[in-house]
Image (spheres, grey):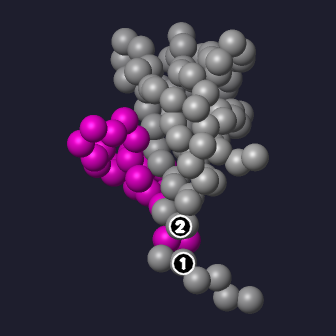
Amino acid sequence: MTVKTKAPLLATLDAARKAPLPEGRLSALLMEHGTMQLRHYRPPAGGDPQKPHDQDELYVVMNGSGYFRCDEARVKFGPGDVLYAGAGAVHRFEDYTKDTELWVVFYGPKDGEA
């Protein structure tokens, strides 16, 4: 079976760290196909200003540690962990180390999957 995509087959951490941030965005886009976007995110010093998104998303922690708040839940995270925020959820990173960086995968329809 051949998969047809315009997305690159590989996104490296080195490329992610060098990718420019588009104006008005906090994460750099590295890969896109259909509804899926892969982004690189480093929460800024002084606090994570994220607002709810209109798609479901996964965060894969590459480096750093801290806490992830999603609605009323708060969990500790570290390298290798995967975090989930459903579309529309109020979420942010808290008390994170300055080396925190994550892959972010946005996917699915607007307003999230059923």
Residue ID for mark 1: 5
Q: In this view, does 104 lie above or below 35?
A: above
Amino acid at the residue labelled 2: His
Q: Which residue is rendered at x = 33% and y = 39% of the image?
A: 25
Callouts 1 and 2 close, C-beta under 8 Å: yes
Give the magenta-colored segment's residue range. Answer: 7-31
Looking at the image, which is closer to me, 51 or 80? Answer: 51
Q: Which residue is rendered at x = 53% and y = 67% of the image?
A: 33
Looking at the image, which is closer to me, 106 or 98? Answer: 106
Q: Which residue is rendered at x = 44% and y = 20% of the image?
A: 48
CA–CA distance in space, label 1 to label 2: 7 Å
| Quarter-of-image position of residue 62 | top right
Q: Is residue 88 left or right of residue 23?
A: right
N-terminal of the pair, mark 1 or mark 2, is: 1
Residue ID for mark 2: 33
Judged from this view, the residue extending furthest toward the bottom is 1
Local secondary structure at mark 2: strand
Amino acid at the residue labelled 1: Thr
In the rendered image, the quadrant that contains the N terminus is bottom right
